[in-house]
Amino acid sequence: MAYDSAATRTRLLDAAHAEFVERGLAGARVDRIAAAAAANKQAIYAYFGSKDALFDAVLDAKLRVLADLVPFTPDDLPGYIGALFDQLVADPGLLRLTQWKALERTDASPTELAAHLQKAAELAGAHDSTTERAMDAMMITLAVAQAWSTTAPTIRNPDGSDETERLARHRDAVVASAAAVTAALLA
């Protein structure tokens, strides 16, 4: 059977995603990633150069998928934030991965900075606002979209009511909050 470099690279990305979600960049081990991918450790360095570059590749791949699943809608920030909330609930590993990134690398990469500045400019243009106000609206509403996943289940649902119904009510609150932020900051 011939060696399939694309398949090996894919297995490495999948194994690295699981490792980074669970342990973060500092706690991840290339030995575990290679073993989980059924590849040798040298393949990580050959394809990605370093553990840090592998982390960047995993994060970049997940964010590209997120951008495809939840396209940015500058004229409907509440709708975008609601869709983002849905995706974060469906894929809790994505939020964990971005939290590890924020904890272990406090600065934005050039790609992250460019993406956020572009979204802020589009949002400002759609609402005839300033880029600064648009960036504030984005930061606040992004935090709102993440609140469910970053709050302990016993706090977000202390009475033990039906989790599905509670989640739906919280989603409504997320969208309403994004609408209120849009009205307050971008009107």
Image (cartoon, grey):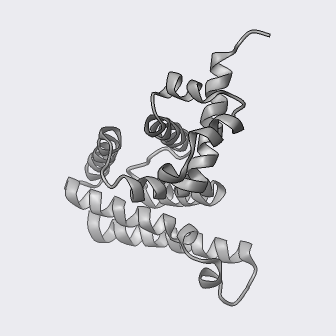
Q: Quadrant for the C terminus, please.
A: bottom left
User: In the figure, is residue 43 to the left or right of 57?
Assistant: right
Q: Position of residue 182 (x, y in %)?
A: 35, 65
In the displayed structure, would residue 164 be above or below residue 125? below
Q: Where is residue 30 in the image (x, y as percent from the top left)?
A: 57, 39
Q: Which sits in the foreground, 168 or 28? A: 28
Q: Quadrant for the N terminus, please.
A: top right
In the displayed structure, would residue 95 be above or below residue 14? below
Q: Which sits in the foreground, 60 or 168? A: 60
Number of marks present in the image shown:
0
Q: Which sits in the foreground, 57 or 63? A: 57
User: In the figure, is residue 113 to the left or right of 96?
Assistant: left
User: In the figure, is residue 123 to the left or right of 36?
Assistant: left
In the displayed structure, would residue 62 be above or below residue 104? above
Residue shown at the point (45%, 33%) measured from the top left: 50
Q: Position of residue 13 (x, y in %)?
A: 60, 35
Does any portion of residue 167 appear in the rendered image?
Answer: yes
